Amino acid sequence: MSSQTLILASLFVAIISIAIFIFVSRRKSRAKRNLVVLIGPSNSGKTAIFSSLVYGHAVPTITSMQANSSFLDLPGKRDPIQIVDVPGHPRLRDQFKDFLSSAKALAFVVDANTASRNTAVVAEHLHTVLDAIMAIPPSQPLPTLLILAHKCDLIKTSSLSADTSALAVTRVQTILERELERRKLSQSGGMGVEALGDENNNEKLNMGGLDCRGPGGTFKFENWEGGEVVFLGTSVQSSRSDEKSVKGSIAPLMDWIEENM
């Protein structure tokens, strides 16, 4: 056997070994992931969702200044599901990065009623999440990004029979795609998209995470290269007297957790 053949054979074995290592690492990491991380701007309703999942009903909340963590036991599941609620304060919200390696899902909560008024703030926050997900090493599995169009029960419609959940999802998705595309175009043109006076402006201007497949690369969640994105409409009520309604309002999120974790 020639030396060239030996070199090629060695390279082939090395490539196969690396591929097997990455595959096994991903399987082990995926098997350990039993965590859902709630993230999003302040006052979007994260803590109300957290308490509804963990305690079965929402409780009066104040703006969180530290992460909340608890466990959700589901029938038929051997291990409990860990739920973490990360504060939305600008100085604290990056704490979600501490959970990236073990998260099965990142649930980004958006107040569907105020999304149009707070578009830039919500999109900037989401942009940091997209950038962090796409920076995950190839050896690690990517978390699913759940975008919760929250407080959908407060959506005003002209028809009593209208599906407010579907309306909320459509509204939030359209608003976010439009604003993230604007941010992408601004960055590619060398224009700033952050607020003046932001002390972290230079760092944020260099954020990536908005790459999409398809003609022109226009930002669409369905074409985003960072992995799976799922939109769900949710809502909660602060009254404990109507637990059936509360559980039903977060049913889409509960269903996803039960089916995927």
Image (cartoon, rainbow, N blue to C red):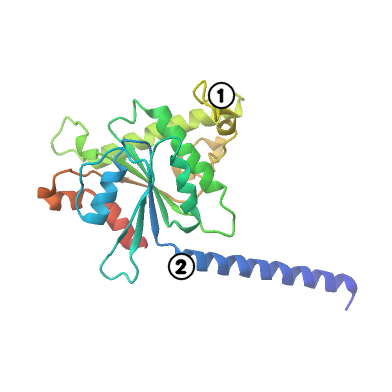
How crowded is the residue under tag 1: few (<14 C-alpha within 10 Å), some, or many (20+)? some
Distance from label 1 to label 2 (Cα)? Answer: 41 Å
Question: What kind of residue is marked 2?
Answer: Ala
Left or right of 48: which side holds 211? right
Question: What kind of residue is marked 1?
Answer: Gly
Q: Which residue is painted at 34% across and 38% down in the image?
A: 110
Is 128 or 169 nearer to us in this picture? 128
Q: Is residue 194 visible?
A: yes
Q: Which residue is painted at 51% across and 48% down in the image?
A: 133
Query: Circle 2 is placed at which residue position?
Result: 31
Residue 122 sits above or below residue 131 on the image? above
Looking at the image, the residue that sits furthest to the front is 65
Mark 1: secondary structure: loop
Is 159 or 74 nearer to us in this picture? 74
Q: Position of residue 7 (x, y in %)?
A: 83, 70
The quadrant of the image that shows the C terminus is: bottom left
Residue 88 sits above or below residue 71 on the image? above
Q: Is residue 225 visible?
A: no
Query: Circle 1 is placed at which residue position?
Result: 192
Q: Which residue is painted at 13% across and 36% down in the image?
A: 160
